[in-house]
Amino acid sequence: MWWRDILTLDDRLAKICLGHGSSIDETAIIESGATLDTSNGPIFIEAGTRVCAGAVIRGPVFIENDCMIGNQALIRGPAVIGTEVKIGFATEIKHAIIGNRVSIGPMCFVGDTKIDHDAYLGAMVRTSNQRLDRQPIRVLEAGEFVSSGSDKLGCWIGAGTAIGIQVIILPGRVVPANSTFDPRITIEKNLPCGHYRIRQTLEAINTEGVS
């Protein structure tokens, strides 16, 4: 179950990291002004990855080969980031599992979330991870809603899905694989695979004679 992968990530990383210090591959590029904070856990960065100036990474975090962590990005562990992932300017990643070749645009928030391979998130996408009433988040399993037991849970974004600018995803949702969500949609419920957009009506206002 996808949400259990998120909720147990801290424990699984702790077992993997037990007895190991941080490791930065010699071919990784850590630009001047980037911060690697290992006070809460180690940081592993593999070959060919670039961490740009102003980025902050707080362990425990695994970042695989050939990634790009943009300027002013913040990654708060526990987090696992696959190969060839691009994370844009001022994006925050918190408690997340990110698959290979995922692209996340600038000024996004990805919290307590799982993203499968080859997904694309445009600028300012938000994964909401907490209910306003602070109650445990419910998820849909086998046609029924069940409690996750946690008041912090984001979403699961399926492989190959493209999400447009300023899309908001409510807590506990599953975003279907190989789908497209045009800009400024709020994903309020689990939906079947497809292409979704918002209809809008523009009205021209006659302002003649208005001072």
Image (cartoon, rainbow, N blue to C red):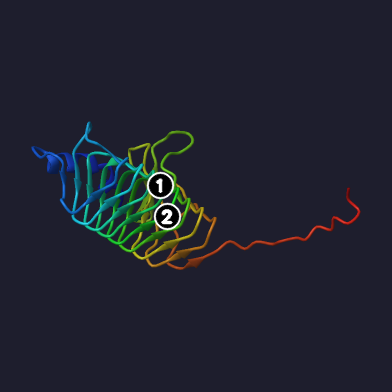
Q: Residues within 10 Å of mark 2 (few under 14, many from 20)?
A: many
Instruction: Identify which residue, 210 or 28, lies in the foreground.
Output: 28
> Is label 1 in contact with label 2 (beta carbons under 8 Å)?
yes
SS class, disc 1: loop
Viewer-nearest residue: 146 or 84 = 84
Location of residue 9 by image quarter: top left
Residue 188 on image: x %, y %: 49, 52
Q: Check disc 2 and report the residue beneath it.
A: 105
Q: In the image, what residue type sits under mark 1?
A: Thr
Q: Residue at x 38, y 50 (%)?
A: 155
Provide residue 34's location: percent of width, then percent of height.
31, 41
Q: What is the x, y in percent for residue 164?
A: 48, 59
* 46 up-or-down from 199: above or below: above
Q: Which residue is mark 1?
A: 91
Three-letter code for the amino acid on which mark 2 is drawn = Gly
**From mark 1 to mark 2, how far is it between C-alphas?**
7 Å
Tell me where residue 36 sits by quadrant: top left
Question: Quick one: 4 or 140, which is closer to the camera?
Answer: 4
Side (left or right) of 135 relative to 196: left
Q: Nearer the viewer, residue 26 or 110?
A: 26
Q: Is residue 53 above or below residue 122?
A: above
